[in-house]
Structures are given as structure tokens and as C-alpha cells.
Amino acid sequence: MLEVYPILCRVGRMDNYSYLIRDKASNISAIIDPSEAKPIIDKCQELGIAPQYILNTHHHYDHTDANLEIKEKYGAKVVGNIKDSSRIPGFDIGVEAGKSFMLGESKAEIIDASAHTQGHILWYFPQDKILFTGDTLFNLCVGGLFEGSVAEMFEALQKIKALPDDVVFYPGHEYTLYAARDALAYLPQSAALKNYILKAQQRLSQGLPVAPVSLGEEKQCNPYLMAATLADLTNLLQ
Ligand code: ZN
Ligand code: FE
């Protein structure tokens, strides 16, 4: 079983999420996308956890800035797409799309989602039905196309859509309320979307992340995920 602790970083600036995750059976743990060292170290201290791994989704600095500090403090190994070995700070272990990585007894499947960046990967833990989406899928929106095409983003979203509805996802940023306005403009009649936004506002007002949301719910409310064709997605991204 995998435990997930979201850690909000760069608060009020970029609102990144790093995640402390722990495989309960083995007590092996990792930080997903170390954005900022201080809040991550505080959370590790609070829980008495020393992470053995750093798992990166992509090379952008707001997801890797604390790699070296966390690596040095805990002796953690940095794991990322082998294709990003020269772009991810402190890189130690390469993984490949279509292959898997064991965090203790929890298996992560590596899914290629090149679009936001080339080499962006999703970390999918099928036993626990947990998906870390980095800057590919956010609540109610998707990441910008820095190094990829709309067609590549469409392909990445189809892979996410193919996963079971009861998978929950954890994104790389807290962008829900910004995305909500655009989503409402596209889906003004959607009761599901209104309910989604209400729940999001409640969670945020309690100091909680909007995540985790199930893919089933996201597929009903996220216009980018709902786009049925490449042409639909192209229209949304213009
Ligand atoms: Zn990014
Ligand atoms: Fe980012």
C-alpha cells in the first residue's frame, strides 16, 4: 500500500506540489518532484521519514530545484526518464516508458507523456490506483506545450483516459481555481463541474489540496480530457 502526503511548495508564486510517498510494506519512501527543500524537509521531519528516492516527472526547475539538497541530506537516489539524464539535476537511475520501477513492494508503471516537455513521464501505481501527472494533467486543465505539439498532448491524454475511472491523480501544481473559470465557460450547464468546483473551494478553504480527484470525475469535468478529437483539443488550446 502506498501512502501519499502532498506538500505545497512555492506558495502563492507557482503553487507546486511535491509529494512524499511511502510504500507501507517495505517502509521505502520517495519524494515526487522536489520543488522546494524547506517544506519537504519539514514534512519528512514531522513524519520521521528519510526518503530513499527522488522520482521526477520532467526536467523543469520548479520540479527538480530541490533534487540536490534532498539527495545530499538523505542520500536519496534521483530517478527519471533516461532521456532526461542530462537535464535532471543529480540524475542516478534511468527509467523507460513502458517499463516499471519498484518502490519497495509498490510497482510504478512509467507512462510516456511527452508534450509539456519531451521526456515527460507519468508515474502510475496500478495496485493502489494512484497516478502522478506532473505538468501533463492538472485539475480542470492541462500543462502548456513547451516542447511538444497538440497532437502529442492529445496522445498523452488518451493514455490517461484509458486508465480506470477509479484511479485518482495527483498533479504538479494547484491550478484548480484558475482553470475553473475557463472550464465553466466551456461547460456552463454542467452540474458535475459546478459540484467539482464547489468541492474544490471547500477543500482549499480548509487548507487541503484539491487532489486526489478520480479520473472518472475528471473525465466528466476537464474540457481538455473530454476533447474527443485532435481538432477539439486544438480548438481548446488556441
Ligand atoms: Zn513543467
Ligand atoms: Fe511546473
Image: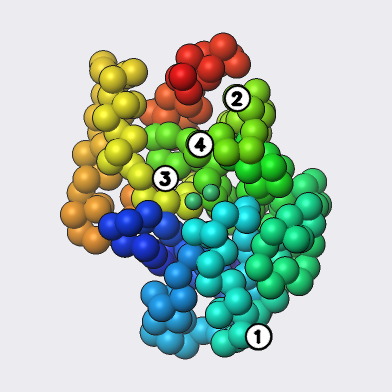
Give SS at disc 3: strand
Q: Is residue 26 above or below residue 203?
A: below
Query: Looking at the picture, how far across and down is residue 213, in whole percent?
Result: 41, 45
| Chain-order first, disc 4 or disc 3 | 4
Say which residue label 1 marks. Answer: 75
State the separation of the CA atoms marked 4 and 3. Answer: 21 Å
> Is label 3 or label 2 in front?
2
| Chain-order first, disc 2 or disc 4 | 4
Q: Is mark 4 within 8 Å of ligand 1?
A: yes
Q: Amino acid at mark 4?
A: Gly
State the separation of the CA atoms marked 3 and 2. Answer: 24 Å
Say which residue label 2 marks. Answer: 150
Q: Amino acid at mark 1?
A: Gly
**Residue 213 disc label:** 3
State the separation of the CA atoms marked 1 and 4. Answer: 33 Å
Q: Is residue 124 left or right of residue 34?
A: right
Q: Is mark 1 within 8 Å of ligand 2?
A: no
**Residue 45 visible to an observer of this rendering:** yes
Q: Is residue 40 left or right of residue 160?
A: left
Quadrant in which the N terminus is drawn: bottom right
Q: Amino acid at mark 3?
A: Val
Give SS at disc 4: loop
Where on the picture, by quarter, is residue 55?
Answer: bottom right
Give SS at disc 2: helix
> Is label 1 or label 4 in front?
4
Query: Looking at the picture, how far across and down is residue 143, in whole percent?
Result: 50, 39
Say which residue label 4 marks. Answer: 144
Q: Amino acid at mark 2?
A: Val
Give SS at disc 1: loop
State the separation of the CA atoms marked 1 and 2. Answer: 39 Å
Mark 2, residues whose alpha carbon is within 10 Å: few (<14), some, or many (≥20)? Answer: some
Mark 4, residues whose alpha carbon is within 10 Å: few (<14), some, or many (≥20)? Answer: some
